[in-house]
Structures are given as structure tokens and as C-alpha cells.
Amino acid sequence: MKWELIAQRENELLKNCLHYESLIEDFVKVFKLPYSDFLTARHGMSYSIYHNKVSSTKIALFVLKKIRKNPDFMKNMHKKGKRYFDNLINFCKDLSNLKVKTNKELLRLIETYFRLYKKPYPYFMITVEARALEKNKEKNVKEAVNLMAKLRLYGRTSFNKTHELALPLFEEIAKRFNTTSYELKFLTPHEIRGLLLGKEIDIKNIIKNRQKCFFIHFNGEFRFLENASLTIEEEVEDVIKGQGAFHGNYKGKVKLIKDISDVNALKKGDVLVTQMTTTDLITDNIKKAGAIITDEGGITCHAAILSREFKIPALIGTKIATKILKDGDIVQIDTKKGIANKI
């Protein structure tokens, strides 16, 4: 089987657990079919996400069929997904008086959090298939792809907000078991439930065994393997190619953005190179860029939308830009041809 890298992130293991639980539980309930084969390889707090292109294409065709049968299909999915994200955020906003709650009460709260966290994922995950439909010229499909892009951005923003709002809940649970919220989120949902029910868990040893681990969703089944690593062969290219979001030619100095703190060093006219743009890079920050190059995304992604809004040449979905380019490199971009060359 051939795995294709689609994203690289930094986040807690707990998020991966909830993601995969939702794929095997909620996605099947909503769409009556299993999600595509999916793999996540973790190293510390970083992880790489891969999919199997063949099975992913089946999901894209399923979505296309639904759109053609019902022009309002994606409008309904957008509405439901947004509602589930709002329910999650509203629950987290209401978390209060945690210090006086019993372990049993905290258990009920964390159970509700897990359930609400998984609910929007089926709707969020079908937005991944937007890239397979971007070149389709049918009116209904183009409108649906735009809605998918909006829901994906709304979802990313909502998940980030949720993590911030729910932090006091995790901190209170962690405090009661002489650990930190950072360490607590190396546990699975089942293990966190166990803690609150009085089960003894060797958290330090668990964290040690999960520095390298991976999740795999294959043929509708899910496996989690700890103290294990994978070597996945990827095709290596030395030419930076992608999709042009806003056409133009530009030559400038590279500023590699690995996390939000790097944005402060971005100077006017720099070529912003990043895995993906987030809402943290919006308006004033991204306006400084003379051009944008991303590893991830398609013509409806966040970076593409911003590049068109601010009329900044952008090359999207190159897969390899952050691996080839480094701070200070001079690069020539031709977004009409979809290429970038280091000078």
C-alpha cells in the first residue's frame, strides 16, 4: 500500500485518540461507510498524517455523488458541522467551579467533553476531500467546495479555541493525580476515565512508551501501537511545484515560519514559507509577505483565500517547500506556471 503525506502537525496524543475514535464510530454513523485508510506517525509532540490515495478517492467520489444528487448536501453538512463545533465551544465556556467538584463530577464533565469533541469530526473530515474536487467546473460542486473550505477553517479555529477553553478542566484533573495537563494528554480517553475511577496508572512510563507511536485506520478498523515507529518511503523531488492561488512573478528572501513566534521576524517583502497558514497569520502579519509558499492546501485553503484577498502571489500544496528552503534563501516564484526556484 502506498501512503501519501498530507499534513504535519504538533499537538497532544489525546487529540489523535479522539480523532480516530470518531472515524470508527461517528463517521460510519453519519455517512454509512468507513472512512479512507489513514495513518498518523508520532514523534514526541509532532506527528505526520498520511492517507491512502485509492481509498481517499472513494470518499471524494461519494461526496461528489451526494452533491450531484442533492445540491444542498454540503450546505446541510456545513450547518450541522458548525452547530456541533458551537456546542463544543459553548460547553467549554460553561466550565466553572472545577475545584469544588468531586472526581465523579469531573468524570461526567470529561466524558461530555470527549463526546462533544468527536461529534464535528465526520463533517470536518469530508472537507479534506475538497482538494480532489477543486478542478470540477460544475456550479453545484464549486459552491460545495467553497463551503467545505469555510467549514475547514471554522473547524480549525474552533478546535484551537476549544483547547484553550478546556485547559482548566485538564489542569484540575492533572493536579489531583500529581501530574500536569501536558502529561495527562499523553493518555487515552479510556485511561483518563480510569484515573478518575481510582485506577492506578504509571503515567511516566506511558509517556516514555509513547514518544514514538502510531495510529492506523485500515479497512474500517483502528489500531494504536506504542513504543513503535514507521519508516515510510516518500518520493523526493528537488523542484518546488504547486498550485497558483493568486498569479504573479516574485523574487524575494525566504522567511520560514515553523510556529507563530517566527511571524515576528517576518519583514515586508519576505517570501513566507510554511507548512500551512492558520488564523494566527491573518491580516497584518500575512500582508507583510511579498509571496506565500505552503506545503499543504489547495485553491480553497486558508492561504489561497488570503492570497486572493490581499493580492499576494501564492504557491499552494508544494509538499516539500519547508524541506528544501531555509531562512535567507532567495527564491523566484512563477505562480502561473506553478513553480518556485531557489536562486
Image (spheres, grey):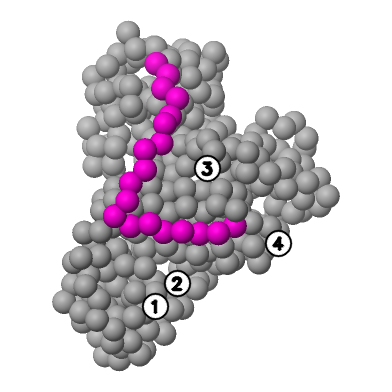
Q: What's the distance in space between the residues labelled 1 and 2, CA to CA?
A: 6 Å
- The image's mark for residue 114 is 2
What residue is rendered at 43% in x and 79% in y? 111
Which residue is disc 3 drawn over? 51
Where, by quadrant of the figure, is residue 282 drawn?
A: top left
Q: Is mark 1 on a helix, strand or loop?
A: helix
Q: What's the distance in space between the residues labelled 1 and 4, CA to CA?
A: 28 Å
Q: What residue type is labelled 2?
A: Phe
Q: Do the residues labelled 1 and 2 touch (CB within 8 Å)?
A: yes
Task: Based on the picture, tell me whether residue 181 belongs to the magenta stretch.
Answer: no
Q: Nearer the viewer, mark 4 or mark 2?
A: 4
Which residue is disc 4 drawn over? 32
Q: Which amino acid does label 3 sit on?
A: His
Q: Which amino acid does label 1 sit on?
A: Ile
What residue is rendered at 74% in x and 54% in y? 73
Judge whether 3 appears above or below 177 on screen.
above
Q: Is mark 4 on a helix, strand or loop?
A: loop
- The image's mark for residue 110 is 1
Decide: few, some or many residues near mark 4? Use Cα within 10 Å; few <14, some 14-19, many ≥20. Answer: few
Percent of width and height locating residue 47: 35, 47
